[in-house]
Image (spheres, helix red, strand yellow):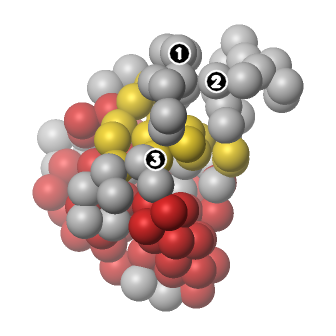
């Protein structure tokens, strides 16, 4: 099982199942674009948390802790479990439209999946 992180604007690596994990659709990408793969918007941070982090980008550790709390319950927990099933079946890439994936929600998801 391998979990990697990428940007949705890049080509999909061969042999990898790409999962787009943002809540909002990326700018400039058509709905039928093959770079999207699957769309799992349910695992993304809540709108409230995303907006809070947008105003506090210097507080990544707090954002990550709050996001882990969200991932532990409800719809996000079920979506995370579905991603874990995909990851057990083969290599997946968690894709985001964020300019800097390293300071986004995606590393938190990857860590929760053991990647």
Classify 78 as above or below 20.
below
Tell me the tag on residue 101.
none
Which quadrant of the figure has residue 115?
Answer: bottom left
Find residue 75 and report its horizontal and vertical position in percent: 62, 78
Rendered location of residue 77, percent (x, y) = 51, 80
Which element is circle 3 on? strand
Callout 2: SS: loop
Report whether residue 30 is seen.
yes
Q: Who's the residue at 16% across and 41% down the image?
A: 58
* Residue 108, percent from left and from top: 29, 58
37 to the left or right of 73:
right
Quadrant where the image shows the N terminus: bottom left
Q: Earlier in the sequence, mark 1 or mark 2?
A: 1
Q: Which residue is mark 2?
A: 35
- Residue 76, given in percent of the width and then of the height, sits at 55, 73
The local crowd at label 1, few if under 14, some if 14 to 19, many if 20 or more residues have their Cα within 10 Å, is: few
Q: Given contact means CB atoms under 8 Å apart, are the residues at marks 1 and 2 in contact?
A: yes
Q: Residue at the spot x=44%, y=41% of the render?
A: 93
| 3D distance between C-alphas at marks 3 and 2 | 13 Å
For the residues bearing labels 3 and 2, Cβ distance under 8 angstroms: no
- Residue under circle 1? 11
- Give residue 92's mark: 3
Q: Of 92 and 57, which appears nearest the observer?
A: 92
Q: Nearer the viewer, residue 111 or 64?
A: 111
Viewer can see residue 46:
no
């Amino acid at each position: 099982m391998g979990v990697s992180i990428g940007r949705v604007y890049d080509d999909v690596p061969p042999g990898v199942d790409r999962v787009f994990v943002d809540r909002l659709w990326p700018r400039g990408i058509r709905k039928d674009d093959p770079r999207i793969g699957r769309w799992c918007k349910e695992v993304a941070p809540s709108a409230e948390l995303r907006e809070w982090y947008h105003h506090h980008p210097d507080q990544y550790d707090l954002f990550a802790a709050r996001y882990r709390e969200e991932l532990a319950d409800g719809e996000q927990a079920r979506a995370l479990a579905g991603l874990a099933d995909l990851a057990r079946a083969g290599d997946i890439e968690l894709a985001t439209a964020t300019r800097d994936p390293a300071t986004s929600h995606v590393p938190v998801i990857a860590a929760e999946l053991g990647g």
